[in-house]
Image: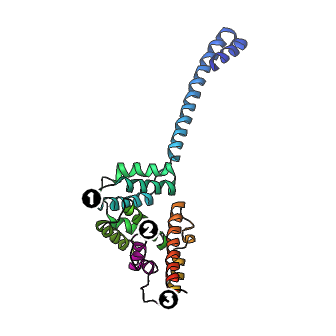
Amino acid sequence: MIKWIAAVVGLYYMKIPGAFIGFFLGSVIEVLFKRGASSSNDAFQMFQQKERVSPGDFELNLLSLCSIVIKADGSVSQGELDYVRSYFVRAYGKERANATFRTFNNVVKSRQVDAGRICAYLHMRTTYEVRLQILHFLFGIAEADGKVDESELHELSRIAGFLRLNRSDFESIKAMFFKSADKAYKILEIDENASDTDVKKAYRKMAKKYHPDKLEHMDEAYKKGAQEKFTQVQAAYEQIQKERGF
């Protein structure tokens, strides 16, 4: 279109020679314009690629820990896989979760997963409360197929040690997934001989430790996990209250 307009303008001012000159210059301008548009489109596509959601190191390391727990009992159950996917979608959204799973399957899955290295990375970059929630999440994976077996419990214990979580906190979270006569006491990190005063003190301590506000900066799935632990602490305290009548 530009070359024909230029040809008409050239014809008007310079007759036939002007028409040829105008046509030639118009053709040059059209080529340059198309190149510019193509470059702009390429730049836009590059910008789109940069803006695509990509998984972060935290998600990939967390997913690597998940894979250790899932494979601990020698089999991979669909219930465990569904539990992990559901958690990641709630925490990061479907697009980011899918990107994390793709990257893990294409890059990380083929490598040997080193729990110690991963936990050292997470220890340096997360608060104690977040690491408690990671352990709670991993216990949830192990239980997703109906029970936490000994091999899974062994891996969970190792991971808790690598994350530098107190043994009492490990036992407290473990008690949330196992039925036992002293479950309520284990959750509060005390024994059955504790005084009423010590029970109340332990409850206040645990309620503070597991309060959802501790994870206020985290995604919704983490807050939900904190609420679950907080609810179990409350239930344990109420059970002891009822049993002792105070």
Q: Which numbered marker is on residue 136?
A: 2
Q: Position of residue 134 (x, y in %)?
A: 44, 66
- Residue 159 magenta: no
Q: Please say if the residues under marks 1 and 3 sit with CB atoms less than 8 Å apart.
A: no
Q: Secondary structure at mark 1?
A: loop
The type of residue carrying mark 1 is Gly
Q: Please say if the residues under marks 2 and 1 sit with CB atoms less than 8 Å apart.
A: no
Q: Secondary structure at mark 3?
A: helix
The type of residue carrying mark 2 is His
What distance separates the C-alpha of mark 2 from that of mark 3?
A: 25 Å
**16 relative to 186, above or below:** above
In front: label 1 or label 3: 3
In front: label 2 or label 3: 3
What distance separates the C-alpha of mark 1 from that of mark 3?
A: 42 Å
The type of residue carrying mark 3 is Asp
Residue that lies at the very extreme toward the left in this rendered image:
74
Question: 136 and 101: which one is in front?
Answer: 136
Q: Which numbered marker is on residue 74?
A: 1
Q: Secondary structure at mark 2?
A: helix
The answer to whether 62 appears left or right of 230 in the picture is left
Label 3 neighbourhood size at 10 Å, few (<14), some (14-19), many (20+)? few
Residue that lies at the very extreme toward the right in this rendered image:
12
Magenta extent = 166-195
First reached walking from the N terminus: tag 2 or tag 1: 1
First reached walking from the N terminus: tag 1 or tag 3: 1
The answer to whether 112 appears left or right of 49 in the picture is left
- What residue is shown with label 3? 198
From the image, which quarter does the C terminus lie in? bottom right
